[in-house]
Image (cartoon, rainbow, N blue to C red):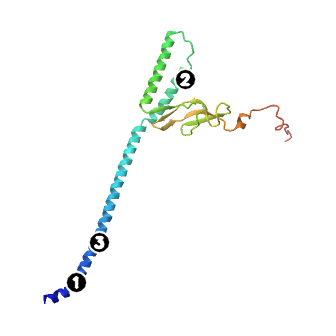
Amino acid sequence: MSEEHTEQDAPFANDAIDTLNAALEQLQAENAALKEQALRYAAEAENVKRRAEREMNDARAYAIQRFSRDLLGVADVLQRALQAVPGQVEDPAFKNFVSGIEMTEKELAGAFEKNGVKKIAPLKGDKFDPNFHQAVMEQPSTEVEGGSVLMVMQAGYELFGRTIRPAMVVTAAKTASAANGAYNGSDTASGGTVNTQA
């Protein structure tokens, strides 16, 4: 009788095993999905943390940007004052005054350097870089190739690689015709006659 009972229970046992196996597979799949979701949330949290740290570091680094931009005018005025000093100064009081301006300019330059503000002063012949230079004029030149810096009119400054003020430069004309484009009075091919009847 116990054998009959086990034979009759065998289909129920197989169904129970199949049901349990299906439930186990479902739980394993759900577990894998939850693990993947937890890893994604952890990665997202790490990315948010890194982004916040980077933004805080940028905020600290560039917090002085507006202040330093305001001080650039002071640096320019000191530079112009030193350039305007005559070559030979006899008056000792005036010599002391000029010496004070020089020391003030050096101190300001040191403060800029200490806080990450660097001067952008390209040399004659350097390639024009629109990220650091602003072309205010273009001149024909035989000294440097076209598109290169010919002269610096006002130095620029950068703060940790970010341009605060571009250097204002004169660039060499890119075409040879611009260098030869000066007016020549003997040129009769163009503009020989003017129609005055209107």
Q: Residue furthest left?
A: 1
**Circle 3 Cα neighbour tier, 10 Å, few/some/many (<14 / 14–19 / ≥20):** few
Look at mark 3 in the image and give the residue it sits on: 25
Look at mark 1 in the image and give the residue it sits on: 12
Q: CA distance from mark 2 to mark 3?
A: 81 Å
**Circle 1 Cα neighbour tier, 10 Å, few/some/many (<14 / 14–19 / ≥20):** few
Residue 37 in the image: state x and y as whole percent.
33, 61
| Residue at image coords 52%, 9% | 91
**Circle 2 Cα neighbour tier, 10 Å, few/some/many (<14 / 14–19 / ≥20):** few
Pointer 2 and pointer 1: residues touching (CB < 8 Å)? no
Image quarter hosting the C terminus: top right
Q: Is residue 51 above or below residue 174?
A: below
Q: CA distance from mark 2 to mark 1?
A: 100 Å
Left or right, residue 116 beside residue 38: right
Residue 2 in the image: state x and y as whole percent.
13, 87
Pointer 2 and pointer 3: residues touching (CB < 8 Å)? no
Residue in the foreground of this view, choosing between 160 and 5: 5
Left or right, residue 50 beside residue 83: left
Q: Residue furthest front?
A: 3
Image quarter hosting the N terminus: bottom left
Going by the numbered disc 3, the residue's amino acid type is Glu
Q: CA distance from mark 1 to mark 3?
A: 20 Å
Going by the numbered disc 2, the residue's amino acid type is Arg
| Residue at image coords 24%, 81% | 14
